Image: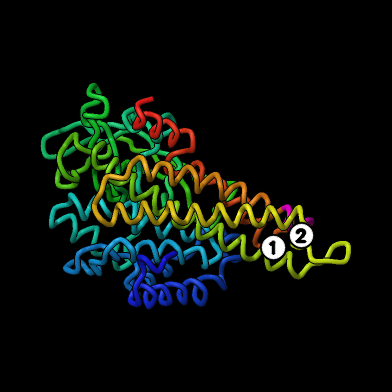
Amino acid sequence: MGYRYFKEEHEIFRKQVRDFCEKELAPHHEEWEEAGLFPRWVFEKAGELGFLGIRCPEQYGGSNCEYWYTVVWAEELPRCQSAGVALSLMVQTDMATPAIVAHGTEEQKQEFLVPAIQGKKIGAICVTEPGAGSDVAAIRSTAKKDGDYYIINGSKTFITNGTRADWLTLAVKTRPEKGYSGVSLFLFPTTTPGFTVTRKLHKLGQRSSDTAELAFEDCKLHKKYLLGEENKGFYYIMEGFQYERLVGAVSGLAGAKLVFEQTLKFCKERTVFGKPVSSHQANAHQFVNFATELEAAQALVYHCCDMLNRGENAIKEVSMCKLYVGELAVRLVDFCLQMHGGYGYIEEYPVCRAYRDTKLITIGGGSSQVMREIIARMMQL
């Protein structure tokens, strides 16, 4: 199916990303999973190889490529065998930095974007709070103007890269009384006095990525760190959600396909009652059903990627994509673990970790319920 979109140069890039993931990252996946964190050199090496600025302007160290290179990046990342590493890298490339490219000043791009592309500074997207996530208008953290500064107070949670981020793309209320029209974005250096990482969160899956709760107490931030226009942050976040959700679906589907292929191989080699597990009709038909659904999901994913590559508004289609891929991946991995029998329940088999990791696809970046609500509104239901 990819032949319609991928040319020889895309496949050359694919091999570069695959080699990085399989040869330099995958050998460490168990160690990093156990430690609950992977080392900073991963960002630095990805920066050296040019992976962290795929669609960024060349003048800042990027490659200025079209969206299909990002698709290749997201499809190959699961081969590192660590969903947490893949997530943290995609936060850097597709969640924390795009708003800087689109709305940042030259000074901001030099301070944050250039070292982010080089892998020398780690970023985090900082929207979710204990009482607000996809409902961005409900955030309560504030930034009050004080001369040439803003005084920031509040808290954030579920922040990927949060324990070691060098800067945050931070959403706060500058006009709390105006709801979504009072949200602004700031580029927030984590060396700012009053900022603290209050807790590292211990998760069901994706354990090699750090996830944190953050607190802001009278943090004094210069106005030069306002990203774009004051009170336009909600619109910038909505722009970013399309890309964030789609790259999650692209990578999630690629990861599900890997688990499916590994499981099919296992079931062809393992025999029960005198023949391969995959040959029993009940199992064979389920494999066929999932193969069909994966093919359908891939068509939807590439359709959405094509829309974004052509600059079209794809909010409804991307929401459908995230919903469908996420719920398919969860069902698929559940089936794959079952096909492994007792081995699927043992940590040394990759399907065990995949079972824990995959659930996040239906939660992070907007839950399945939120996706249904967005689609329903766009259908005027």
Q: CA distance from mark 2 to mark 1?
A: 7 Å
Which quadrant of the figure has residue 46?
bottom left
**Is 227 placed above or below 353 here?**
above
How crowded is the residue under tag 2: few (<14 C-alpha within 10 Å), some, or many (20+)? some
Specify whether 260 is left or right of 226. Answer: right
Q: Name which residue type carries label 2.
A: Tyr
**Residue for point 70% across, 54% down:** 285
Disc 2 element = helix
Give the residue pinned by disc 2. Answer: 343
**Residue 110 appears at what percent x and percent y?**
18, 61
Which secondary structure lies at badge 1? Answer: loop
Residue, far top: 177
Residue 94 point in image, percent of width and height = 34, 55
Instruction: Residue at 24% x, 38% y: name it.
Output: 235
Which of the numbered marks, if any, corresponds to residue 101? none
Kind of residue sitting beneath label 1:
Tyr
As displayed, is residue 328 above or below residue 57?
A: above
Q: Residue furthest right?
A: 273
Our reading of the magenta stretch's main secondary structure is helix
**Where is residue 163 drawn, in percent x and y?**
43, 51
Which sits in the foreground, 143 or 253? 253
| N-terminal-most mark, 2 or 1 | 2
Q: Quadrant of the N terminus?
A: bottom left
For the record, the magenta segment spans: 338-344
Q: What residue is disc 1 on?
A: 349
Horizontal side of residue 363 vs 304, given as left or right: right
Q: Which residue corresponds to the image point at 79% horizontal and 67% vertical from the top-left?
A: 270
Q: Is residue 342 one of those drawn in magenta?
A: yes
The reply to whether discs 2 and 1 touch (Cβ–Cβ < 8 Å) is: yes
Q: Is residue 364 left or right of residue 135?
A: right
Q: Quadrant of residue 288?
A: bottom right
